[in-house]
Amino acid sequence: MDFLSVTRVLLEGFGQTCLLFILTLLFSLPLGLVVAFGSMSKFKPLAWLSRTFVWIIRGTPLMLQLFVVFYVPGMLFGISLFSGENGRFIAALVAFVINYACYFSEIYRGGIEAIPKGQYEAAQVLGMTARETFFTVILMQVIKRILAPMSNEVITLVKDTSLAKAIAVAEIFHRNEMAFLARGLVWPLFYIGAFFLLFVGVLTLLFGYLEKKLSYYKI
């Protein structure tokens, strides 16, 4: 196959890769904050449950979690929740969202707990509510603190999307395997690296820009 034909097929798969990446971030970022608040809750059973869940998810491979989400409902209840190509994509999305929400929750928790208690006390003296304190005083400082570790996780997510191939999601590696590896073409596999390098390069520039924009928040 010629270079343009290979590029067209890989771009179709990369579109699925990008969609999985974007939707995972869209759902896992707010969910991670919810899990973080659960982990920090003063209600001990909720805190214990949240931290135990995070420990399990962070302690097991993402590929295993993909298999659990995709296969276990059918094994336990005899029903196929994720049939067809769209079902496989949804199963991958669910697994990715749960996994990254737990990782993000620990980054959130570390950033929030690193803020000096004096800032909370000063906000109380000024008569600010807990909500006003968090969104007006704390939030931007937390974002500044967590931006670097968050950028690492986001870049890792870009590469982890390739694991969706394990349940036959039509992302870029799966498209390459079906269209080219089966015919003995190996070079498109290395061509895929250019797609990921470009994607990660754009994200690196974006996070560098955000770090400069937030540099006036002295920590």
Image: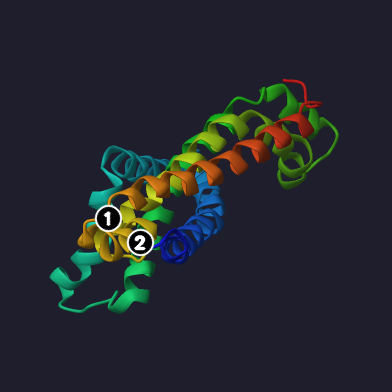
Give the quadrant of residue 47.
top left
What is the three-letter code of the residue carrying label 2?
Ala
Residue sitting nearer the eye, 181 or 163: 181
Placement of the N terminus among the 4 image quadrants? bottom left
Residue drawn at the location 75% of the way across and 39% of the way down: 133
Residue placed under numbered mark 2 in the picture? 92
Task: Confirm or deny contact between disc 1 and disc 2 (CB under 8 A).
Answer: no
Residue sitting nearer the eye, 156 or 5: 5
Residue sitting nearer the eye, 42 or 192: 192
Residue drawn at the location 48% of the way across and 56% of the way down: 24
Q: Secondary structure at mark 2?
A: helix
**Percent x, y of residue 89:** 37, 68
Residue drawn at the location 66% of the way across and 37% of the way down: 205
What is the three-letter code of the residue carrying label 1?
Leu
Residue placed under numbered mark 1 in the picture? 185
Q: Residue furthest right?
A: 126
Residue 52 in sight from this viewpoint: yes
Of badges 1 and 2, the one in the foreground is 1
Compare marks 1 and 2 and give the one earlier in the sequence. 2
Q: Secondary structure at mark 1?
A: loop
Q: Which mark is residue 175?
A: none
- Cα separation, mark 1 vs mark 2, equals 27 Å
Residue 41 in sight from this viewpoint: no
